Amino acid sequence: MDNFETNEIIEYMNRKYAENVPRVIRFAVRKKAKMIEKFELDEMPSSLRNCTVESFIIIIKDALRQGTLKF
């Protein structure tokens, strides 16, 4: 992935994060996002490592809707 693509992804995430999100929610998300820094790739199940972004988002949305994902 080149620098342009990386920057494009980061800019997209920053825009989505800044859109009409209350300050308290941004604070909570920032704290949870810090946990991502601690993820070790070799500890992740192969199903997650091989998952596409599209599939990952669908899985997360469904789990949130069903209440099975505990944030």
Image (cartoon, helix red, strand yellow):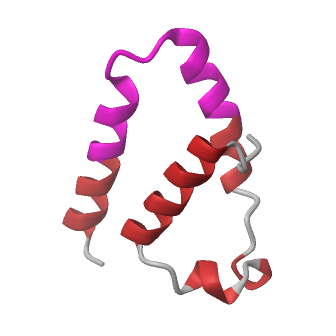
Question: Is residue 9 in the magenta section?
Answer: no
Q: Compared with residue 37, is residue 46 higher up or lower down, i.e. above or below?
A: below
Name the quadrant containing residue 20: top left
Question: As rendered, which of 64 and 46 lies closer to the eye?
Answer: 64
Provide the residue span drawn in magenta. 11-31
Q: Residue at position x 80%, y 80% from top?
A: 43
The C terminus lies in quadrant: top right
Q: Residue at position x 62%, y 21% from top?
A: 27
Q: Measuring from the top left, give residue 5's x and y in whole percent.
A: 23, 66
Q: Measuring from the top left, give residue 16's x and y in whole percent.
A: 33, 34
The chief SS type of the magenta part is helix
Give the left or right position of residue 36, taking residue 70 as reference.
Answer: left
Q: Measuring from the top left, give residue 26's x and y in whole percent.
A: 54, 22
Q: Residue at position x 28%, y 44% from top?
A: 11
Question: As rendered, which of 15 and 51 lies closer to the eye?
Answer: 51
Q: Residue at position x 73%, y 49% from top?
A: 35
Question: Is residue 13 in the magenta section?
Answer: yes
Give the left or right position of residue 42, taking residue 19 as reference.
Answer: right
Q: Measuring from the top left, give residue 22's x and y in whole percent.
A: 48, 11
